[in-house]
Image (cartoon, rainbow, N blue to C red):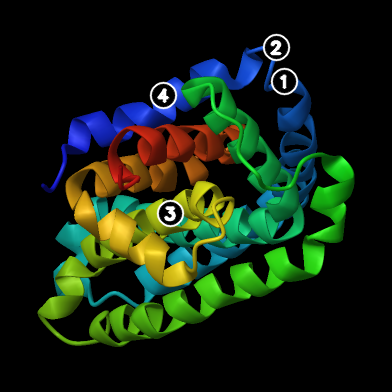
Amino acid sequence: MEGNVVRGADYLVRGARMLTHPALRLFVIVPLAVNIVIFASLLGVTFRFLDSTINSWMTALPGWLGFLEWIIWPLLVLLFGLIAGYTFTALALLIASPFNNLLAEKTEELVTGQPVEALEGPLAALLSVPRAIFRELAKLAYYVPMALLVLILSFVPGINLAAPLLWFLLGAWMMSIQFVDYPVDNHQLGFAAVRDAVARRRLSSMGFGGLVAICAGIPVVNFFVVPAAVVGATLLWCEELREQ
């Protein structure tokens, strides 16, 4: 079964609502602090780059295409926002990944009432940093070839009109894989298991990942999207993706 896009997106909303749960509150603090530091530091740089780049592109636009400026501008802002959001989120995840695993572990235990034999505490999370970084790099290696393909297609006449949509779909797919990996990893399953699980419920996964990708590109909201997405992805895993 493919799942449901709306239900998939709702997992992020439910995840956000659970962030204040007493059983999870402590495990939200570290990822949230990392997100605030990273996003706040890089936000100004991104907006300066975005403003100068888009202005130069619009200046180079042929005069006879000037009537398209009203639609090209928001499309470019959306495109750059999604790319920047995914890049910053990936950096935050690389730094805080062990604590995200711990948050996923505690969320699954809260939802299912069953213990998860995973990190078992902050010390174990710190000791797992090298393994977590290796897993994040594996996801990056999976993402880069697809991103390069979309980038090439973005310069192909005709096809490049669909470039913002292609980038969004790629971002949605990667966000679902990125966050579902945490509960999957807690069960000592490989990266291939993550791809298989997401593919089994493709629409639910894309709905979840799509909303995460959008929120990751919104200033201030992106401070909180990582812990909310970790919790939401764990709910998605428990309710739809996990093989019974």
Q: Taking 116 as reference, is 15 above or below it?
A: above
**Res. 168 visible in picture:** no
Left or right: 82 with respect to 170?
right
Question: Which secondary structure lies at badge 2?
Answer: loop
Instruction: Determine crowd level at label 3: few under 14, some 14-19, many 20+ residues with C-alpha closer than 10 A.
Output: many
Distance, label 3 to label 1, CA atoms, is 23 Å
Instruction: Determine crowd level at label 1: few under 14, some 14-19, many 20+ residues with C-alpha closer than 10 A.
Output: few
User: Pointer 3: what residue?
Assistant: 175
Return the disc, 4 or 3, that comes first in the chain's sequence.
Answer: 4
User: Pointer 4: what residue?
Assistant: 13
Return the disc, 3 or 1, that comes first in the chain's sequence.
Answer: 1
Left or right: 30 with respect to 43?
right
Q: Are marks 4 and 2 in contact (CB under 8 Å)?
A: no
Residue occupying image coordinates x 86% and y 53%? 126
Q: On residue 176, which mark appears?
A: none
Question: Which secondary structure lies at badge 3?
Answer: helix
Question: Which secondary structure lies at badge 1?
Answer: helix
> Residue 52 location, x and y as percent?
56, 65
Label 3 or label 1, whichever lies nearer to me, is 1
User: Pointer 2: what residue?
Assistant: 22
Return the disc, 4 or 1, that comes first in the chain's sequence.
Answer: 4
Distance, label 4 to label 2, CA atoms, is 18 Å
Based on the displayed image, in which of its 4 quarters is residue 133 positioned? Answer: bottom right
User: Pointer 1: what residue?
Assistant: 25
Return the disc, 3 or 2, that comes first in the chain's sequence.
Answer: 2
